[in-house]
Image (spheres, helix red, strand yellow):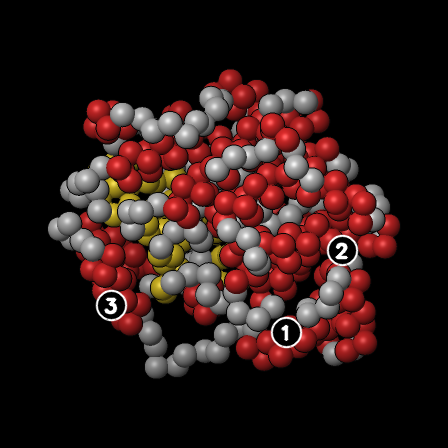
Amino acid sequence: MSEYYRVLSTISLSAAMLRAQYRFITSNRLPIILQHLMSSHTASEGEVLLAKHGCSGVITLNRPKALNALNVNMARLIYHQLKLWEEDTETFLVIMKGAGGKAFCAGGDIVAITEAGKTGGSLAQDFFREEYILNNAIGTCKTPYVALIDGITMGGGVGLSVHGHFRVASEKTLFAMPETAIGLFPDVGGGYFLPRLPGKIGLYIALTGFRLKGRDVQKAGIATHFVHSQKIPSLEKDLLTLKSPSKEDITDVLDSYHKESKTDKDDPFILAEHLEKINSLFSGNSVEEIMENLKQDGSPFAHQQLKTLMKMSPTSLKVTFRQLKNGSSLTLQEVLTMEYRLSQASMKGHDFYEGVRAVLIDKDQNPKWKPQKLEEVTDEYLDSCFASLGENDLIL
C-alpha cells in the first residue's frame, strides 16, 4: 500500500483555492447551444481537457504531476460536459483517459479535504457532493462510456471508471481502494460495485486494501477488457474513427483488442489459490467474526490478512462492512446517498484526520486510532454515521 500513499502525498492543492473555484452543481442541464464552447473548454490551467473528435467526446485528466488527481473544479466541468454530450444527438461515444503515462487517476485531493475539514471549510462537503454527482452521471450515462485505465487507478479514479459501460485495463494498471488504512471507507460507489464482484472478493478488497495489477483487474471483474499499454493509442484511434457507432460496434473493437492481447501462457488470477479461503473466512456476520475466522484458520494466508486488518482503523472496518452489506441490495443512487452521509461522518470524526496525518503529513505510519478496538465501535455510533442528513442529504 506504500505506492498508494506515495501517490497521495504528491497531491498538495490549496483548499482555499478549491473553495474559491467551487460552484454547486445543479441538476439543471446546460443549453445545447454551449456545446461548441464546452468541447474546447478546459479547467484551471488545463487540469482537464474536453474535446470533440468526430462523433466522439474525449475527456483527458491532465494533472500528470499529481497523477491526475481529481479536484472539485475538474469534477464540475466533467459533469457538465458529460451531460451535454449525453443530450447531443451527434455524440455516440465518450472516452475518459489520463495524461502522463503513469496514472489514469490516483484519487481525490485528500490533503486539501483534510485541511478544509479541520477549519470548517466547505470543501469537506462540496468535494464529496460533486464527486458523487459525477459518479452517478457516469453510472447513468446513456452514451457509451469507455475509461482507459492505463495506469494507477485508485479511490476517486475508480469512481470515474468503474460505473461506466467499459473499463480497459493494461499491464500498467494498478487498482486499489485502501481507504480503511487512512480512516476512511471505499467510497465513490464502492458500496455498490464491490459487493457485486464474485464471492467475497469485494469485501476482501475493501477491508484489506489489496492491490490488483494488470490482467488481474479484468479477471476480478473490475475491468471489462485487457489491452497491452502500447496498443492503447491504436485502440483509441480505432474507436474515434467509428462512424455513429452503436454500443455493439464499440464492443466489437474492444473485444478484438482484448483477444489480440491474450498470450499462450495465461497466468491464473492472483487470488485464485485463495478464493476458497476468502469466500469462507470473509463470510462472517461481523468484522469481529471475520477476525475470529482468520485466527481459527491459522494458515499463512489467514495470518497475513489478520496482520493487515489489525493495522486498519477499527471504525473504518466496521463502517465499510456495513456499507457493503447494505449496498448489496441498494441502487447506485441509494449507495451514493449513503456514502455521502458516511463521508460527512468521517469529516466529523477522529480517524480520518489521524490517518492522513500518519500516512501523508508526518509519514510516521503509526496512526493512533480512536477507538483502538473493534468492540469499542458501538452500533449506536455506526447508526449515527448512516443516519439521514435531512436537508443536507445528497439528492440524485
**Res. 272 image quadrant:** bottom right
Q: Amino acid at mark 2?
A: Lys
Q: Is residue 37 visible?
A: no
* Left-right relation of 20 to 347: left
Classify 67 as above or below 14.
below
Q: Is the C-beta separation of discs 3 and 2 under 8 Å?
A: no
Q: Is residue 118 visible?
A: yes
Q: Nearer the viewer, residue 22 or 257?
A: 22
Residue under label 2, please give it: 311
**Res. 41 image quadrant:** top left
Which SS class for mark 2? loop
Residue under label 3, please give it: 256
Q: Residue furthest left?
A: 243
N-terminal label among 1 and 2 = 1
Residue under label 1, please give it: 279
Q: Nearer the viewer, residue 95 or 111?
A: 95
